[in-house]
Amino acid sequence: MVNNKAMVDEKMLTEKTKEELIEIILGLYKENEELKQKIKEEQQKRVEKFAKSNTTKKRKHRPGQKFGHIGITRHIPNQIDEVIEETLQECPDCHHPLANPVEVIEQVQEDIIPAKVHVRKYRRHRYYCACCQKVITAPYHPQHVPQGYLGANVLIQVAILKYYHCLPYDKIVELFRDMSGLKVSAGGLSQALARLSRWLGVERQVLLESIRGSPQVHADETGWRLDGKKSWVWAFVNDRLAYYAVDRSRGRKVIRGVLTDRFKGVLISDFYGVYFNLPYRKQKCLVHLLREFSDCSKRDNSREYQENYKKIKRLINDALRLREGRGHMSKIAYLRRVAAIKQRLFDFMTYPYRNKNLQRLSKRFSKFWLDMFTFLQDPAIAWNNNLAERMIRPNVIYRNRSFGNRSPRGAQAHATLMSLIQTLKLQKQDATVFLKTAFIAHRQGNLTPRLSIPLP
């Protein structure tokens, strides 16, 4: 049938005139061009659709420095440890002798010398004093760690890698083996850090006393695992100090145990219930409040909720602007405006809402409303708890990689070393130098604390 059809089409074409054949060919050419155009448009649509699905949000600003910015390169070190001359005596092509160089191309390059294990043997000599009639022992060398198989440099580096860089013990073991050839076990490092933390406990006590005397303290907590059981890491921090505690409890007894009745400052926290009914001045984190209002607004589109969401945002922004403009008005005018802010909050809290989300939030206000605008009384008080969330973040990273602690001794080591390292970083001190100096001094019998806390 196909052959018959082809024969019929060929017969029909032979009967056509030249003009008719030209017209048929032009029609076919036009149809072919239209099909090509449709295929091209379809391919373009697919490319645009694919590109749109794989692009991220449009950048607000062009990446990189502004046009005309002067480029900055790495600073050349002041001290050059080694100079290597790259010279030629003859031409590599024709082997003709070369005279003095016409130009010298210089390049400064920084590199790391591979580490190696340095083994020391300390020999303490003992003498008999005929006058005192007793045996006298030579003092310790400044680098001597009594009764330890690992030197102070190793122990401090393990502490930094563990509690600042949040590496698990297995990774630290591999790092020491690959970088220097030092062979240690994960269990040995764990026990060594426990001993290190015990000798540095006097420094942590200085932190605790300083926290209790601080004008303001940010507090937060996060989940933890202690020997496989649910526990908590508590953080008590300010812009100079970081104090951590691991406890099985999430109750207010932990806060009372750390701060005690000696704390006379302001406790800044979120709206968690354990921070209620404490004998301290308090400031609630307004960022937490705005975040919860924002999250509810994504699910609740009712007119009542959206209007009151705008109202509470306007109230908080007015309070922040009032604090910023405190120095431009009289004390009486400022106190009058503070009273007006608190009255607006009281009205917001006591309004009979029909919306369930507003009923829940207004109930929270009735519990904490006296602690929401404490920052208006003292401009130095923070109005959010962002600092505590940032400072508890290292514990979250540690937990995700090491899953908490296996024993109370490990929890104590975590609290002590994390507290000291994070405090030293806040104060921009060299944690390696301080921890090494303090540990060797305490280990050799000098238990005088070396941590000095600057006055606020």
Image: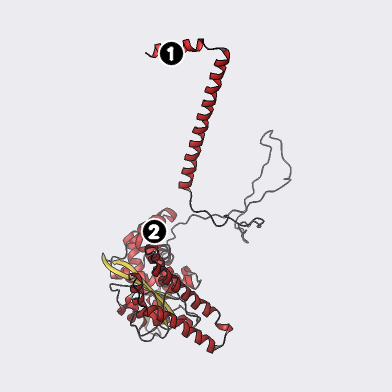
Is 269 positioned to the left or the right of 321 in the image? left
Is 204 positioned to the left or the right of 318 in the image? left
The quadrant where residue 356 appears:
bottom left
Instruction: Judge by depth and name the residue closer to the eye, 456 or 24.
Output: 24
Instruction: Judge by depth and name the residue closer to the eye, 51 or 125.
Output: 51
Amino acid type, label 1: Ala
The quadrant where residue 121 appears:
bottom left
- Please give the residue where the numbered disc 1 appears in the rendered image: 6
Q: Residue at x 39, y 58 (%)?
A: 172
SS label for mark 2: helix
Q: Which x, y percent locates residue 4? A: 40, 11
Label 2: few (<14), some (14–19) or many (≥20) C-alpha neighbours in 10 Å: many
> Residue at the bottom extreme?
332
Q: Residue at x 68, y 34 (%)?
A: 95
Amino acid type, label 2: Ile
Q: Quarter of the image containing the N terminus?
A: top left
Q: Residue at x 33, y 77 (%)?
A: 363
SS label for mark 1: helix
Is 406 positioned to the left or the right of 304 in the image? left
2 or 1: mark nearer the eye: 1
Residue 186, visible in the rendered structure: yes
Residue 172: mark: 2
Q: Which x, y percent locates residue 333? A: 54, 87
The image shows residue 51, relative to residue 6, as above or below, that is below
Q: Which x, y percent locates residue 261? A: 36, 86
Instruction: Judge by depth and name the residue closer to the eye, 161 or 100.
Output: 161
Instruction: Judge by depth and name the residue closer to the eye, 400 or 342.
Output: 342
Which sits earlier in the primary sequence, circle 2 or circle 1? 1
CA separation in Å, label 2 and label 1: 81 Å
Residue 245, visible in the rendered structure: no
